[in-house]
Each structure stands twice: as structure tokens, then as C-alpha cells.
């Protein structure tokens, strides 16, 4: 069975994200002393007293606001409540009980889920600081100071008591990070793949602030799709919140199994797109270049060919790229995206047998010997593939300094010509071996 889910909910700026980060043991959810910073649902897998669980941070709930963004945030929080096994309802002990707290309490009572009432920002406990919160009718209030890590254990003790019976399975899902510039259509693509409004979508660039993980199943296969904040140029990053958002997008790439590189086809491939794609390449991640908004591009019989030629020119450093032309808005060819991601991941996981690899390298050397350098010539003794994701090939040579990048590229092309490694980078490493005397 999947991990039990604990959702953290409450009105804005009551310390939900601070508590989330303390439990996670690192700064994942963005914390800043102003409302509306956490917008989407943020998740992390954690454990307490030997019991694993998934913790979900949500945006602050403003149920009576007419602002479209606050309505979207409330929707996300409501979805988190619907999918949670236990709810941590956060309030503010410094500010005291508010009408907004009563509104959220009414919502939680209707959910019929186990609720742990948390009164945060209580640095020095006294009964009178929490007494008024009994009026919410949600049981005993737990006084905590998330900032100072006080009372967190008591809250988690109460939460795990309410976990449903069952065992937890390891996460064997394919993790797919969706990255790109702001407003390229990443969240729209995620929602189209999921078939539901699981991440916030508005026409405003910069809406997704955090990397949002959503687990789902399709045709018996398990996936976790990670929607990330748009990555802008450094000089365009305006504040600390956006800076940390970009860091989380890069972190999502590092922990992903495969990346979807979303590009606005109407705008075309830009310098920033190339930098983002280059980062994914450097991290050794298999990927698919997703040209989105294809429905807005004026086309003739040669349009795709022209786009492909442009991609080949701009992405010379990763000739292995796979591309697909879609419209997240209309759903055009979206069904191909997951299939291509699966293929790229499979290619990154492929292992060439040592015998076949050595036969291939020997033939390659016969066809084209390594060039000499300062009177010395590179000698290749044997080759082996030492790892996958990405595939790494180690060549035992007489002197690794004699391996010229052009000959390394030649050997890479030979390997790619013999085996399908499309969609994934491969690494070739030369290591010196003393010659037998």
C-alpha cells in the first residue's frame, strides 16, 4: 500500500511551511513572512517512529476571497484534504483565533477525516494561549513552535496514531520532471497528462513556485510527475522566493528519472531554453524536448522539418535528443509524451555486454586509428560499461591524456550507431593502465 498521507492546512501565514521543512529535515517548501508564498501542494516522504508517510504542504486557505489566485489555492488545499489520511490544522497562537480559522474548521469537519489541531508560534506554553481554540470543536489543541522545533514530536505522535492499517511499498514509480521557461505550458501539460486539475494553471507566468510531485498510475504503470517553476535568466530573478523556486526546479531535475523539456513552439527555441536543456544534459538525465503550443504555429508541409533542423543546430551538444510536437491546450499528441519518456528511460537503463562492446571498439579502431600526439599514439586495451542512467563506458588506455575529444566523439557515435541510446546522454571515460612489460 502507498504511504499514509498527512496534509498540513490552515489560513495563510500560520507557519505550515516552517513545520513542513522541519519534518523534512531540509528547506523544501518556500517560507517567507507574507501570505500566498506557498501556492501548490508540496510533498515529501518522511518517517516517524518507524512509520513512513507522505507529508503535504498546502497554500493558505482564504475561503471568502474573490481573488482568482486565492480561489485556486483553496482548491489545491481542498484536494489535499480529500486525498489525506490525517490532517494537521494549523492556527496561529500569537494572533489568536480568527473567523478564518472557524471557516477552515467547518471545511475540515465536513471532510470526516482525522484532524490534529495545531496552535503554532507558542514559544512559551501557558494554558490560556490555547484555551480559546477548543471552541473549534476539533479536540485537544497541540501547542508548538515550529520555528524552534518545539512540540513537533507530540503532533507527529498523534498523527501516526490515526494512520490506516496496512503496509507501505517502496516508491518504484518513474519520476518525470517537467522543466522549462515560465509560461511555456508546463502545468497545462501536467494537467492534461493527469486528466485533472492537480496543479494550478493560470495564464500568468510564474504561477508555479515550487516543484510539485503528483503520483499516478496509467495502464498499470506507476509515475510521479514533478511540475516545476519556470526557470528564468539569473538577471531576471526578482526576489528570494523566485530564487529558491529556481533552485527547486534544478533539484527536481537531479532527482528525476527522466525530464520533459517544455518549449514554447510559437516563440521557438531561445538561449534560455538551450541553457535549461544543457543543464539536464550535464546531469546525465534522459529527456524529451516537448514543443508545446503547436496549435498556434502556422504550418506547411516543411514546418516540422524546419523546426528539427533548428533543434539540431542549437542542440549540437546533444545530438541524441528526442522531440515531440504537441498542444497541451487541445491535447494534440500529448499521449505520445509518456511513451517517449518511457523509451528514453529504457535507453538510459540499457547495458551493453562487455564482449559485444569490446568487439565494437576493436572494429572502430581498425576503421579509424587514434591520432598521434607529440609522437605518441593512444592505445585502447579493453572497454566495459560500468553503470547505467546514464550509460557510462570506461576505456582502459595507455595514457588518458592522449584521448582527444574528437576521437571520444567518434567512439560515442560508433556506440550510438550500434545501439539505440536516443534520448539519453552517454559518458565515455578514459583511464590509464600501465602497459605490460
Image (spheres, helix red, strand yellow):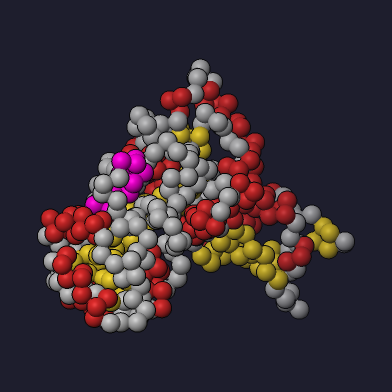
Q: What's the magenta bit mostly, secondary-structure-wise?
A: helix
Q: Position of residue 145 (x, y in %)?
A: 36, 76
x, y percentage for residue 354? 53, 63
Q: Position of residue 328 (x, y in %)?
A: 38, 34
Point 88% across, 61% down: residue: 374
Q: Residue at x 24, y 81 (%)?
A: 127
Residue 399 highlighted magenta (yes or no): no
Q: Nearer the viewer, residue 351 or 334?
A: 334
**Is the N terminus in the top left, top right, bottom left or bottom right quadrant?**
bottom left
Residue 5 seen anywhere in this rendered image of the structure: no
Q: Is residue 16 left or right of residue 302?
A: left
Q: Which residues are magenta?
A: 66-81
* Quadrant occupied by the C terminus: bottom right
Q: Nearer the viewer, residue 119 or 391?
A: 119
Observer-nearest of 215 and 282: 215
* Residue 78, magenta (yes or no): yes
Q: Residue at x 48, y 58 (%)?
A: 248
Amino acid at each position: 500500500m502507498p504511504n499514509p498521507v498527512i496534509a498540513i492546512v490552515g489560513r495563510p501565514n500560520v507557519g505550515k511551511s516552517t513545520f513542513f521543512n522541519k519534518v523534512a529535515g531540509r528547506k523544501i517548501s518556500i517560507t517567507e513572512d507574507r501570505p500566498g508564498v506557498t501556492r501548490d501542494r508540496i510533498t515529501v516522504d518522511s518517517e516517524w517512529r518507524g512509520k513512513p508517510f507522505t507529508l503535504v504542504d498546502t497554500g493558505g486557505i482564504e475561503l471568502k476571497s474573490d481573488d482568482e489566485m486565492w480561489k485556486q489555492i483553496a482548491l489545491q488545499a481542498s484536494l489535499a484534504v480529500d486525498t489525506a489520511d490525517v490532517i494537521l490544522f494549523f492556527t496561529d497562537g500569537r494572533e489568536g483565533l480568527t473567523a478564518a480559522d472557524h471557516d477552515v474548521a467547518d471545511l475540515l469537519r465536513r471532510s470526516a477525516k482525522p484532524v490534529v489541531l495545531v496552535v503554532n508560534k507558542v514559544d512559551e506554553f501557558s494554558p490560556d494561549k490555547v484555551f480559546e481554540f477548543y471552541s473549534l470543536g476539533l479536540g485537544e489543541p497541540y501547542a508548538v513552535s515550529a520555528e524552534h522545533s518545539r512540540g513537533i514530536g507530540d503532533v507527529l505522535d498523534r498523527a501516526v496514531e490515526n494512520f490506516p492499517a496496512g503496509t507501505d511499498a517502496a516508491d518504484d514509480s518513474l519520476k518525470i520532471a517537467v522543466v522549462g521557461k515560465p509560461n511555456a505550458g508546463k502545468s497545462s501539460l501536467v494537467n492534461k497528462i493527469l486528466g485533472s486539475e492537480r496543479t494550478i494553471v493560470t495564464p500568468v507566468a510564474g504561477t508555479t513556485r515550487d516543484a510539485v510531485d503528483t503520483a499516478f498510475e496509467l495502464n498499470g504503470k506507476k509515475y510521479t510527475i514533478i511540475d516545476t517553476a519556470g526557470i528564468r535568466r539569473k538577471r531576471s530573478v526578482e526576489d528570494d522566493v523566485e530564487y529558491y523556486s529556481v533552485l527547486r526546479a534544478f533539484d527536481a531535475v537531479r532527482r528525476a528519472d527522466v525530464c520533459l523539456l517544455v518549449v514554447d513552439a510559437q516563440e521557438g527555441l531561445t538561449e534560455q531554453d538551450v541553457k535549461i536543456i544543457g543543464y539536464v544534459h550535464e546531469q546525465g538525465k534522459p529527456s524529451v524536448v516537448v514543443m508545446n503550443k503547436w496549435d498556434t504555429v502556422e504550418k506547411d508541409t516543411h514546418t516540422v522539418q524546419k523546426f528539427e533542423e533548428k533543434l539540431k543546430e542549437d542542440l549540437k551538444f546533444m545530438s541524441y535528443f528526442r522531440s515531440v510536437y504537441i498542444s497541451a491546450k487541445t491535447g494534440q499528441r500529448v499521449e505520445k509524451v509518456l511513451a517517449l519518456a518511457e523509451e528514453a528511460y529504457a535507453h538510459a537503463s540499457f547495458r551493453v555486454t562487455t564482449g559485444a562492446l569490446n568487439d565494437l571498439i576493436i572494429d572502430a579502431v581498425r576503421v579509424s586509428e587514434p591520432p598521434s600526439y607529440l609522437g605518441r599514439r593512444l592505445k585502447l586495451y579493453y572497454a566495459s560499461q560500468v553503470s547505467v542512467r546514464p550509460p557510462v563506458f570506461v576505456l582502459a588506455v595507455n595514457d588518458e591524456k592522449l584521448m582527444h575529444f574528437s576521437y571520444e566523439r567518434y567512439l560515442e557515435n560508433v556506440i550510438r550507431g550500434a545501439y539505440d541510446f536516443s534520448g539519453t546522454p552517454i559518458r565515455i571515460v578514459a583511464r590509464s593502465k600501465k602497459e605490460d612489460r
